[in-house]
Amino acid sequence: MKIMCVISTMQAGGAERVMAWLCRSLSLLGHGITLICLDKGDQPPAYALPDSVKVIYMDVLESSNTVLAAIRANFFRVYKIRSVIRNDNPDAIISFMHETNVIVLLSNIGTGIPAIVSEHTTPVRRTKLFWSVARSIVYLLADRITVLSEYFKAHYVRWLQYKIVVIPNPVIPVAASEIGVTSTERKRILAVGRLVELKGFDVLIHAFTEVASLYPEWDVVILGAGPEFEKLNNLIEELGLLGRITLVGYVEDVVSFYRACDIFVLSSRIEGFPMVLLEAMLNGLPVIATDCSEAINEIVENGVNGIVVPPDSVESLRDALVELISNEPKMREFGTESCKDLDRYCEKSIIDGWGRLLMGVTDEKS
């Protein structure tokens, strides 16, 4: 089967990582994969793609300063993507993320090619009004819509419900580096994510302020890059936590950190489907997660395999850290429980779901 996958960019991000995995997995199953990126490809993909995947960069992502310019730009995007669809003539199209999905569905009108659009954020997350309305209407053109959880499905408008299929993102195993993380007798709290306000790393830093004095053998390690680096680093310095909280930056070998740390914290204010949380649990870490996504309660059973706290609450996060740090048997119990019942997120289960979906939509159109 010839499959065209479409995404705005392949720079570092959760949806981008899943797209790379999906392209690799479908290619290994013998499908011919063409990956369309809407950016100009001036930077290499953040995630490895096999040579068998053909990548086309469209260079249609320039920002617009006025409404009229934005309308023109979107018409141009539709024209360019439609040209590629007609030239490549795939058996099916898979598109990721709502703005790209809308453009792709409009580009595909009249071709008869089945199109699957995939959402990777919560539907209750605030989006620009235009795109929210466009999604509710234009998604009627999709053959199927994939979402990450049953809760996400329930929050879509009723006239799209019959098109929606739940396919979670996979937990993608990554081999740890042979070098790994330097061993130490100190205990570590780990957090992972892009350094942006929505990730709530400032809340974690404030929460650790009191914990640091109570438990001097514990440190915090934050992996990720982003625009908030300087602001967070200044906050760490102001609170006198230099040497106790480390901003490591972007790291490819996250697995070595999962294995070298003792507690994982998801401090986000809002999330779609937090893959780093699943990865931490797969590696046996006890977790503390904010209730930042409707998917959290599908992943963490509060008091059984982790602790769930309200988002943006320094006090609640501090208390949860103290609860775990002060109770080593509970830490071990949560770590043991956290890696159970994750089979539904394994790669085979997820790619089988995609395979059934692709066969279904192509059979309907044949």
Image (cartoon, rainbow, N blue to C red):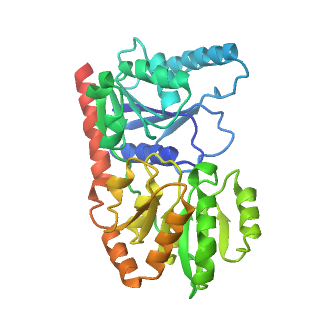
Res. 180 image quadrant = bottom right
How many numbered marks appear? Answer: 0
Q: Position of residue 126 (x, y in %)?
A: 52, 34
Of 164 and 7, the residue lying toward us: 164
Q: Which residue is drawn at 23% across and 22% down?
A: 364
Q: Where is residue 8 in the image (x, y as percent from the top left)?
A: 56, 34
Of 63 and 84, the residue lying toward us: 63
2, above or below 248, in the image: above
Q: Where is residue 342 in the image (x, y as percent from the top left)?
A: 30, 60
Res. 366 image quadrant = top left
201, above or below 127, in the image: below
Q: Residue at x 40, y 36 (%)?
A: 32
229, above or below 55, in the image: below
Residue 194 in view here = yes
The N terminus lies in which quarter of the figure?
A: top left
Residue lying farthest to the bottom in this orientation: 185
Residue 253 in view here = no
